Image: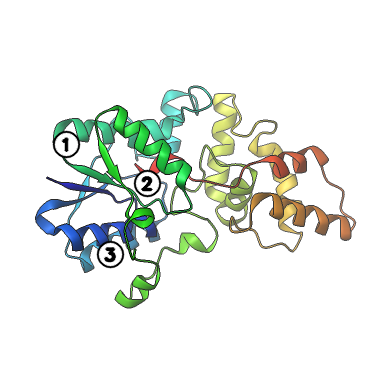
Amino acid sequence: MKHIVCYSGGVSSALVGAMVLKKYGYKNTIWLNHVVNAEPKDVERFEKEFAEYHNMFITYANADESKYPGLTPYSVAKKENCFQNGPKMVLCTSKLKTEPFYKWLKENYQEGDIIYYGFDANETNRIQRRSSILASSGYKSDYPLAFWPNPLDETYLDEIDIKKPMQYQVFKHANCRGCIKGKLQHWLCVYVHDRETYDKFAELEEQIGYTIQRDKSLNELRSYFDLCSKSGIEITEHMPSQTFWAAVKRRLKNIGVTYDEKLFKAGLEEEQAKPCECVI
């Protein structure tokens, strides 16, 4: 019986990896990852340091790099000439993680094996969705941060002297910068903190003829994002989306700056930034 941890490079999945390893031992534990080169280098540093500390090998289930050079969401979108097939089918997730993941399971999963995720007790909707999807294919899953007694938390990183990825200083999750499912707040963060990635996707939008956001292209959003960055509000994903946009709007009004009310309406209505299903 194997215990397969979806080891994504984020803190939550790392804590789950340590918990499962301690309970079931090296012989029965697998830390499964996928190479996606749009994640910051410091995420790679973290996942490798954490694995080395625990004397664990990382098992990789990667997409075909000959088909998607560099293994990035950008390379997938450029190759397929689109960002997604329908509102819920984001190609980078499907091609770089979901398909390699299920291919690996088909070749390696045995009855009784369990797949582990880093969702916590505050993510019941994600737990229900993920467990239902896996169960429909005959796979068992478990969520130690939500269901096990005395789960590890970030203080464990202090104990073992490993710093979490710097990505968390701005973004809520250690996923790609330039997420196709990212809303306005995410892309504002990319614009301010990673202009090179923003520019690449803005150019790709023009090539494909499709915009990632509903109403405006990334190029059209530049002047709007310039205003937001000058508002004095800290540009991160850590403030809830509606609170963030209301604060920016209030600040711009106070300093007498005109803005596009429709864009703020979109920001106020968008959901709190969440990662895509890249965790698998």
| Structural distance between the alpha carbons of marks 2 and 3 | 19 Å
Q: Residue at x 72, y 44 (%)?
A: 268
On screen, residue 88 above or below 145: above
Residue furthest to the right: 256
For disc 2, the marked residue is 37
> Which residue: 64% across, 38% down?
218
- Label 3: state its secondary structure: helix
User: On the image, which quarter does residue 21 sit in?
Assistant: bottom left
The residue shown at (32%, 77%) is 159
Mark toward the start of the polypeptide (3 vs 1):
3
Label whose residue precedes the other's in the sequence (2 or 3): 2
Disc 1 secondary structure class: loop
Q: Nearer the viewer, mark 2 or mark 3?
A: 3
Indicate the quadrant where residue 128 lies.
Answer: top left
| Colour mapping used in the image | rainbow
Mark 1 Cα shell of 10 Å, populated few (<14), some (14-19), many (≥20): some
Q: Is residue 259 left or right of residue 97?
A: right
Q: Label 1 sits on what residue type?
A: Tyr
* Residue 50 image label: 3
Left or right of 8: which side holds 216? right
Residue 230 image point, x, y percent? 75, 59
Name the N-terminal-most of marks 1 and 2.
Answer: 2
The amino acid beneath tag 2 is Asn
**Which residue is under mark 1?**
109
Q: Is residue 10 visible?
A: no
Q: Position of residue 145 (x, y in %)?
A: 36, 57
Q: CA distance from mark 3 to mark 1?
A: 25 Å
Depth check: give the residue in front, 6 or 233.
Answer: 6
For the C terminus, give its image quadrant. Answer: top left
